[in-house]
C-alpha cells in the first residue's frame, strides 16, 4: 500500500504547477474579467410591445378579418403612432391603402377619421359618387379634384354647372387600379370616392348627389 502524499509535498507541487502555467492562468483571468466588463457595458434589451400587422398582401378596400392580422412585437421607440395593440380593434375595418405582409397597421391605413391625419383642423372626409363611375379609375389617393355639380337637362330646365369645391384631395377610392396581390377584392362597390373638405365645402358636397350630377375634374395641387 502506497503512503499518502504529505500535505507539504502537495503544496509544493501546486506552487510549481501555478508557476509553470502562470501566463496561461493570467490570460484566462484577463479574459474572464474582460467578458464581465463587456457584459456590464452592453445596453439592456429594449422593452417590446405588441402591435397589429398584416399577415398577407392585401388590396385597398379589403374588409379585415382576424386571419389577415398578426401580432408582432417591436421596441417601444419603433412603434408607429396610432397603431393598434390588439386585432379586435382592427377586424371589420376597411383598408384605405394596399398593404404588404408584415406592414404595421395604423389609423391612416383605414377608411375613416384616420384618413385625415395631418389635415387642417376641422377637415372632414366626404364620400362622393360621381355621375360617371368610370372617372374613379383615373383617381388615386393624394390627387386633387374640383367637384362640379350639374343641374337641369338643357331642355325643360336650363343646364347649370356649379363648382362646389376646388382642389380637394382624394383620400380613398373604391377602384383599385393595381394588379397582382393588389387587385380589387370581389364585391368592392364601384364608383365611390372619399375627399377631404373643409366644413363649408362639406355642407355643399353632402347633398350634391340628390340635387344633380356630380363630376370630378382632375386638377393640379395648389
Image: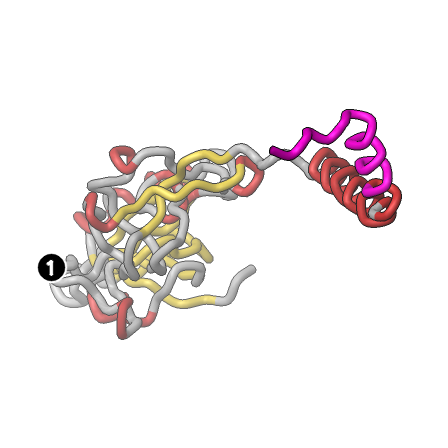
Q: Secondary structure at mark 1?
A: loop
Q: What's drawn in magenta, residue-wise?
A: 1-17
- Does residue 220 sit above or below 214 in this rendering? below
In this view, the residue farthest toward the front is: 1
Residue 188 in picture, x, y percent from top left: 16, 59
Between 82 and 140, the one lying in front of the other is 82
Q: Main secondary structure of the magenta part?
A: helix
Residue that numbered label 1 is attached to: 187
Residue 87 in picture, x, y percent from top left: 28, 37
Q: Is residue 115 magenta?
A: no
What kind of colouring is applied to the model shown?
secondary structure
Q: Quadrant of residue 199?
A: top left
Between 36 and 66, the one lying in front of the other is 36
Residue 31 seen from this side: yes
Which residue is found at the position 41% from the left and 48% from the top? Answer: 104
Q: Quadrant of residue 25?
A: top right
Between 160 and 33, the one lying in front of the other is 33
Amino acid at each position: 500500500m502506497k503512503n499518502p502524499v504529505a500535505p507539504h509535498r502537495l503544496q509544493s507541487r501546486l506552487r510549481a504547477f501555478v508557476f509553470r502555467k502562470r501566463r496561461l492562468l493570467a490570460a484566462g483571468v484577463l479574459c474572464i474579467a474582460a467578458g464581465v466588463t463587456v457584459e456590464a457595458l452592453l445596453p439592456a434589451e429594449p422593452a417590446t410591445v405588441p402591435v397589429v400587422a398584416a399577415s398577407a398582401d392585401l388590396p385597398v378596400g379589403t374588409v379585415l378579418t382576424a386571419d389577415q392580422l398578426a401580432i408582432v412585437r417591436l421596441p417601444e421607440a419603433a412603434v408607429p403612432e396610432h397603431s393598434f395593440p390588439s386585432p379586435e380593434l382592427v377586424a371589420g375595418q376597411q383598408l384605405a391603402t394596399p398593404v404588404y405582409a408584415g406592414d404595421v397597421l395604423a389609423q391612416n391605413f383605414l377608411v375613416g377619421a384616420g384618413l385625415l391625419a395631418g389635415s387642417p383642423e376641422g377637415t372632414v372626409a366626404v364620400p362622393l359618387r360621381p355621375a360617371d363611375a368610370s372617372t374613379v379609375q383615373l383617381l388615386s389617393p393624394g390627387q386633387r379634384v374640383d367637384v362640379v355639380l350639374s343641374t337641369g337637362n338643357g331642355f325643360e330646365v336650363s343646364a347649370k354647372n356649379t363648382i362646389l369645391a376646388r382642389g380637394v384631395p382624394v383620400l380613398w377610392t373604391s377602384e383599385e387600379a393595381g394588379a397582382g396581390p393588389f387587385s380589387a377584392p370581389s364585391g368592392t362597390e364601384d364608383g365611390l370616392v372619399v375627399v377631404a373638405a373643409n366644413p363649408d365645402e362639406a355642407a355643399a358636397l353632402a347633398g350634391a348627389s340628390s340635387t344633380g350630377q356630380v363630376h370630378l375634374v382632375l386638377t393640379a395641387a395648389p
